[in-house]
Amino acid sequence: VYRYLSSLRSQGLVDQDVASGRYRLGWKLFQLGEAAAAQFDLKRLADPLLRRLRDLTQLSALLAVPFNGEALVVASIEDERKVSVTVRPGNRPSAHGSAQGRIALAWSDASLQQRILAGRLEALSPNTLVDPAQVRRRLQRLRQRLWEDAPNESLIGINAIAAPVFRNGEELAGMLTLVGTLQDIPSPPPARLIELIRGAASLLSDTLGGTPYRTLGLVPPKALLAV
């Protein structure tokens, strides 16, 4: 394993933290992921919806894609009219302790989900879900309601509300997310924010041939149909 990691590090595919010695994904892997996302054209299709979400809510709007049971942010549009919460492309939200991460985890295959939940679940704040049984219950619930939030879990005072994007039936293609302070996104989130984030995700899913929102009978709000 060490030889493999050394080879990957020499190619810039992984980086090693000098202080801890731990490895993390390198910038070249992110660039490869960006190229794959661009090839699939998900960012281009999502861009007008991200901008519309930003304009309607005055919150930062994100697009993330599933990556080995986790979420990888590939696009971010911030509101420039006020102080906003910034999440840069390349960010990898916690699989168990974030709205986007739990969506990626919920639609992962059973073996990958089991491996992640069997490991140490880091507490990013005192409110992060670290009990595997609690996380599993949240995964089951979000698969039914098709949205998730994570108040105070990644950072005290911050919340995010996310909805899955599907393609080719029920295959997870990505997640649309709104990020803001708890004042902007209280928990539970107001019905309007749930309607907007699921509506945007359903419109993008329809474009990609995703079916869960159609099965649910969800109708996107008129405010989004101007996109």
Image: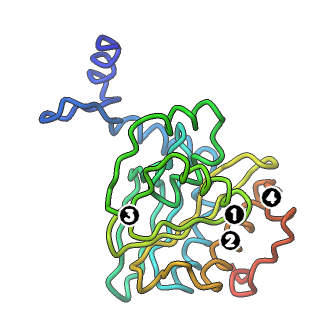
Q: Secondary structure at mark 3?
A: loop
- For label 3, the residue is 127
Label 4: which secondary element: helix
Comparing 227 with 4, the one in front is 4
Q: Is residue 201 left or right of residue 78?
A: right
Quarter assignment of residue 114? top right
Return the residue at label 2.
198
Return the residue at label 1. Answer: 146
| Label 2 – label 3 distance at C-alpha | 25 Å
**Amino acid found under the numbered disc labelled 2:** Arg
- Dot 3 amino acid type: Asn
Asked if the residue under mark 1 is in contact with the one under mark 2, i.e. CB atoms within 8 Å, the reply is: yes
Query: Image point 53% across, 85% down: which residue?
Result: 57
- The answer to whether the residue labelled 4 contacts the one labelled 3, judged by CB atoms less than 8 Å apart, is no
Q: CA distance from mark 4 to mark 1?
A: 9 Å
Q: Is residue 77 above or below residue 175?
A: below
Q: CA distance from mark 4 to mark 2?
A: 11 Å
User: Looking at numbered disc 1 in the image, what kind of residue is underneath it?
Assistant: Leu
Q: Which residue is mark 4?
A: 212
Q: Are marks 4 and 1 in contact (CB under 8 Å)?
A: yes
Q: Earlier in the sequence, mark 2 or mark 1?
A: 1
